[in-house]
Image: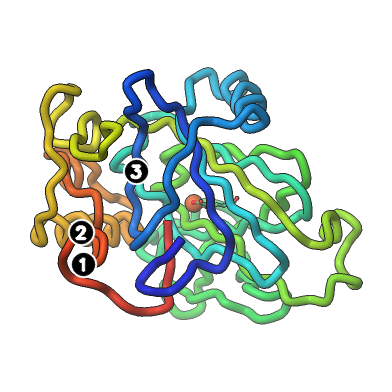
Amino acid sequence: MYHRGGEVPRLVAVEGEVAEDGSFPVYRHPADESPPLSQFSPTVALIRDQVQKVLNHPVNHVLIQFYRSGKDYISEHSDKTIDVVRGSNIVNVSLGAQRTMTLRVKKDKKVAAGPEEPVATDHGTPASTPGTPGTPRAAQRIPLPHNSMFVMGLETNAKWLHAVNHDNRPLKIKSPEEQLEGGGRISLTFRHIGTFLSKDETRIWGQGAKNKSKEAGLVKYDKEEVEKLLWAFGEENHKSDFDWEAAYGTGFDVLHFTEKEGKAGPTSGPEEMS
Ligand SMILES: O=C(O)CCC(=O)C(=O)O
Ligand SMILES: [Fe+2]
């Protein structure tokens, strides 16, 4: 998967519930290029069943990511929720080597929402950027052991940024849990998506689109709409009082965000987010 012209620092696959007519859920986030969605494979379908039992609501989409070693990471972000069914939960299932999920309140959040603690990106390198000098932002470090589920409600996603930072310690000094699978970790991020694409990707409908029914809604490339959506994604990353209705409420029928895919305007830079 690519973001801003560069390959993201982990391997990515996407699976989901493909309907009989070939339509499928779409999760839009600022990536230049996402892999195509495949029908849930039998093994992933079994994991999905377990996730649905815990959540008490369906999940119809999964982003599968392989962190090949401690060098692979996902930088700090909030998940983009235009297409995520409002009120649902997002689940990260972890398999293999234990990594750490770092949660940190957004910069604009004045009131600390938990125990205050500076965050280290790489065991010993402090990365905490205080909102006000001398006041570190509330942060939590959550170990993600093999075969665990991390459930994130959308309220948590709104107030906190999350990351799996790189961990460059040599494998042999890591804990046995961190050494599993030679340091490789697979995460499966399950979401309940409310926006759908037709098989040929010419029509878009549902929660995050302008049209709510299958019959209408042509996917468009419109530079202004793309800019508006990318701006809204940025707002969601930075504002703990992000106003979903104001930002996403009217819906967007754009799918591709760059010239190559959407036939206009490329971006460049190393940053990546989901
Ligand atoms: O690897 C993980 O568990 C986190 C993945 C994540 O935050 C995302 O895909 O948005
Ligand atoms: Fe995320």
Which mark, by number, is residue 259?
A: 1
* Residue placed under numbered mark 3 in the picture: 81
Measuring 76% from the left and 54% from the top, which residue is drawn there? 98
Indicate the secondary structure of the residue bearing disc 3: loop
Q: Which mark is residue 140?
A: none
Q: In this view, does 76 lie to the left or right of 45?
A: left
Q: What residue type is labelled 3?
A: Thr
Q: Are marks 2 and 3 in contact (CB under 8 Å)?
A: no
Question: How far across and how far down the image is residue 155, in percent?
Answer: 42, 40
The answer to whether residue 84 is above or below residue 1 is above
Which numbered marker is on residue 262?
2
Q: Which of marks 2 and 3 is nearer the N terminus?
A: 3
Q: Position of residue 220 (x, y in %)?
A: 12, 47
Residue 117 at x, y percent in the picture = 62, 65
Dot 1 crowding, Cα within 10 Å, few <14, some 14–19, many 20+: some
Residue for point 63% across, 67% down: 72
Kind of residue at badge 1: Glu
| Along the line of sight, the residue nearer the viewer: 71 or 125 | 71
Q: Where is residue 182 in the image (x, y as percent from the top left)?
A: 83, 61
Instruction: Give the amino acid type for the residue marked by disc 2 in the picture.
Output: Gly
Tell me whether the residue at label 1 lies in contact with that at label 2, contact meaning CB atoms closer than 8 angstroms: yes
Local SS, label 1: helix
Q: Residue at x 46, y 34 (%)?
A: 61
Mark 1 or mark 3, earlier in chain: 3
Mark 2 surroundings: few (<14), some (14-19) or many (≥20) residues within 10 A: some
* Mark 1 and mark 3 residues within 8 Å of each other at the beta carbon: no
